Image (cartoon, helix red, strand yellow):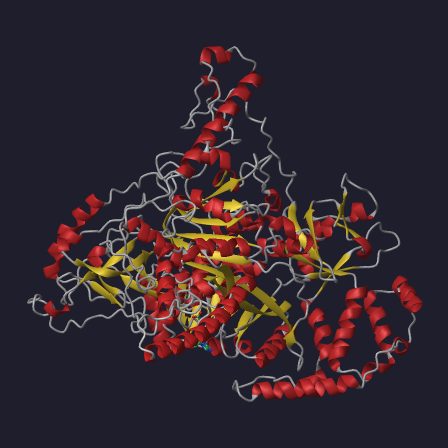
Amino acid sequence: MSPFFETAATAEDGDLAILHLKRDTLTPITLRSTADDGYAEGAVTNTRFGSFPHSTLIGLEWGAQVRASKVDTGTRGRKGKQVRQDGVAVSMEETTTSPGQPAEPVAHLNNKRKSEELEPEARLEHPVPKKLRTASDRVDSTAVQRAAVATVTPLEAGSGFVHLLQPTPESWTSSLDHRTQVVYIPDYSYILQRIRAKPGQSIIEAGAGSGSFTHAAARAVFSGYPGSENPKKRKLGKVYSYEYHEPRVETLRKEINEHGLDDIVHLTHRDVCNDGFLLTTPDRPSPNANAIFLDLPAPWQALRHLTRIPFEEQVIATTTYLRKNGWTEIDMVEVHNRRMDVRREQVGLKNEGLRGVNASAATVDEAVFRLRDVEQKIGDFHASKIDRQLNAQANAAGAGGAVPNGSGRKVQSKADRLDKIKRDAEERKLYKEGNLVHRTETEVKTHTSYLVFATLPRAWNEDDERACAESWDVEAMMRGERSGGETKKA
Amino acid sequence: MSTSRIQPNTWLFLRLPSRSLKCLEIKPNTIIDVGKLGQFPSNLLLGRPYYHTYEILEKAADEAYSRLRIVTPDELNAEVAADEATPAESRAEPATPGVSDGASLPKAMEEAVVQELKNNRLTIDDASRQALSQEDIEQLKKSSAGKEIIDKILANHAGLDEKTVFSRAKYVLRKRSKYLKRFTVLPMDVGTLILYLHEKEPARILEMREETLGLIMAWSNMHGSHVESSADETSLGKLGTGRWLTVDETGGLLVAAMAERMDILHKYTDEEQFDHPPTNAESVQTEDVEMEDVSATLDGKSSTPASRHIPTPRDFPLPATSNTITLLHPAVQPNVSILKHFGYDSNSPNTDHPLHTHLKCLSWLQLLHPADDPTYRQPDTVPDPELFKWKSGKRGNYHKKQRRWQRCQAVVHDTQRGNFDGLIIASNMDPATILPHTIPLVRGGGHIVIYSPTIEPLVKIMDLYSKDRRAAYIQHLSKGETPSIDDFPLDPRLLLAPTLQTSRVREWQVLPGRTHPRMTSRGGSEGFVFTARRVLPVEGGVEARGNFTGKKRKGATNDAATPGGDIVDAGVGVGGA
Ligand SMILES: C[S@@+](CC[C@H](N)C(=O)[O-])C[C@H]1O[C@@H](n2cnc3c(N)ncnc32)[C@H](O)[C@@H]1O
């Protein structure tokens, strides 16, 4: 069973999980109840938001927020006397580790016991049936567990957290290191929609590259596993994937296996331009595909149904090729995807000195107020100059008391004003003040792909037509005899 | 349904030369009338392949209707190729570019375009250059087939040689679409249906576009669940897998798209049956059929000996537990009229359609205040001896009411138990009023996707889940305060990575040397999609951690990213551990 399609209520030992650090920063890990890399806490994943012993993850409900733990790197090697000394820390810093690989070397003896102690505890803490939450019960009925912390004793670090998520093609794609250029979500979601990918179909893709499209396509055609009950005798969906770059094939093959997709994705190491798509298995030579997705430098050399093309000239060569080879409905498009940033924009004098604000006047009234204020201050300044002169004269004359400030108004220093604004801001609900605005996010992934779609209609010959004409007689109607039929206005 | 040949009694599309779509249900022995293009018997299309282009032939003098001819793809493409090709090919079309040279290519393209513009400047667009008058053309149309007309027009067009191959290609295409009596047959599927509806009745589907639907389906992780549940499908004790919740006010388009991906949209048909027309039109089962003397109980057994051999009526079957769509609707009845194109009519359900058991509908009243809903309230029960004295019709009615009640109970309770894999909303209602009732029903890690034709409702949702608001909320909790419902209509901790996005597809014209985006954008709504995942916050607070230096700027903007452990503005991180 693939964790991409079904997961139990809780994350378990051996599961593929996605640690969500923040948006667009996702780390896939394989949960291990034991590990041999020197942490007293067992398997640990380190992120830039803290360390997460797997014992604090296993047994949690999916979607749980998890606090980071203190793991004592200093004890590595010291505590683990029986532990192999070569256990190198596996840094899961999201950019450095290739995804999908188990984060930690697999189980060794000395940790085994620990995990056995751990499990019943974890079960106790999370009785499976979650309390029924009614719609009105909005606050915090989702008691989240600090799994087994007591047993393995990782201490909470006090700051830092992640969320533990089930894998999906989207989270997998977002977490991919860029072995190749990958087909991103806006493109693949449109492609799969456009080629009418449906459960039970077979789809060819070449080249598989990093496997981004592979996962999304597998989800689209998934209609069950072989051997499982199939009462409706439905066809089982398949993705036939081709890639000629051997290391990429190896990595993807491993991932497909770890992701439980062996029965859905059939990966072939092959140069499709030279050798085509026929399968090597003797019983089923052609994949019999409903759709083909080509993501190659020279798609017209390989074949058709549709392609994703980085350069315009390829488009022309491809469409010309398609036209000359019986394809119809040829169409080229480009998908523009934008993410929108939504924020509260704080404009106004009352924001002076605060961070991330626009402290210019928010209204005409504010502007006028500010102008008057400035006028006033200039007036005050001149007045106080006169005062000072008077004072000086008075002092010179030997008189004691200062002459009062010209306007009689107390002047607030800028520092005082900013201080007050800052104090006020703490009481303000900035999250609901200001203007609610949106704009396109600045970080737009702008590599453009051109997508060419085409359809190859099934072949039709005179024999087919004759057989059909026999099945669906029209002669009576042609003679004007209407057998109770009505006219359908299209 | 997914067969490549046209089956009787299915809905399909005809795409006319103008590229507009016609939607019709094809029934055997009927006449299909395509307006000006002509009339032909439906039997001429039945059993024939989809995606082909058909030409309506001139009606023979002794026949009542036109016949059809398949225009082969070769023929179609030869026309295009011949019209646009040869001289251009040598200049702008790279036959097989061996190396893709990104640097030099655009320049080459640019030159080609400049060259083109020059050529076009010499062309004189003048009606007088077309030697055939409009009357001539009308005359021609009466006498011979369209293709001939076009050939004649072209032969009479004096300026054609000066014209570039491209404008010539355009000219030919324009003429062809005007005179050729052709149409292409496309199968009914959600993709083509959305194109059709977006053109014809955009408001009915909340102006949803194909590319937007693609986004919605990907981000909701929509897929079928094919784990066979070992337990009795009708047992109430167990929550199944693959359960999706939706608030769909697109007339059922969204439900159709979900169902298509879950493999429950089409009735299972044997693909190989197409050569044998069914002996009978499909028998439509009405609710009165089979009803007599049957009393269904929860386990499907009948309580009276007389009914032992009669199957339980399928008018109100208990819903499936796995691979299901639960539809929340604002009116008494759900509006899923679009599903009729896929053989499902909620008013007179086809009982062997998968949606009959896999689509569960309930109204907002039934979800929130079931006791106030008449269908949810148990109808009076009548003891068996009494029942036997009733006329069979009355008894049938009685049992029907009981079945309907049981189904309603099952659906309401199943929904209230929550644990849905995902929630998709496309509604006229303010999503801020939908979420408080539905987010608690989604399982941890489940998917939330909201569609809106306009951005404003979703901007509001983004704001309710903003980083600042969440931080303030957590601060309240850590002080032991109850955050006010006015400031926090939704618990901002329950959604992870709230993201707002939009996709638009731009079509390109592909002609040698003149490859550019088509200028056909017709405006309308962009269509926006909000996505997030349901999460389970730790109790107490959490303090973010992160790389403070160099992150300041980002922290200052209220960006939508969820600070997995990223800084929440300094000072609002909340200690709760
Ligand atoms: C842009 S990448 C594909 C990315 C992939 N679609 C994804 O979503 O991750 C192109 C891939 O095609 C492979 N490739 C190129 N020519 C090929 C050929 N003739 N046969 C098989 N694979 C080929 C390359 O090795 C490369 O990995």
Residue at image coords 48%, 66%? A204
Q: Quadrant of residue A331?
A: bottom right
Q: Is A86 in front, or is B520? A: B520
- Residue B488 placement (x, y as % from top left): 41, 48
Left or right relative to B516: residue A218: left
* Vertical side of A85 occupied by B219: above or below: above
* Vertical side of B120 occupied by B379: above or below: above
Left or right relative to B574: residue B467: right
Q: Is B301 in front, or is A66? A: A66
For ligand 1, the image quadrant comes to bottom left
- Residue B432 placement (x, y as % from top left): 48, 48
* Vertical side of B517 occupied by B313: above or below: above
Question: Is residue A440 something one can see in this rendering?
Answer: no
Q: Quadrant of residue B115?
A: bottom right
Residue at image coords 58%, 66%? B505
- Residue B437 placement (x, y as % from top left): 44, 42
Residue at image coords 43%, 64%? A351
Residue at image coords 84%, 65%? B145
Left or right relative to B172: residue B363: left
Q: Is A439 in front, or is A90? A: A439
Question: Is residue A490 something one can see in this rendering?
Answer: yes
What quarter of the picture does the N terminus of chain A occupy? bottom left
- Residue A330 placement (x, y as % from top left): 63, 69
Q: Is B100 in front, or is A120? A: A120
* Vertical side of B573 occupied by B549: above or below: below
Tally of numbered discs: 0
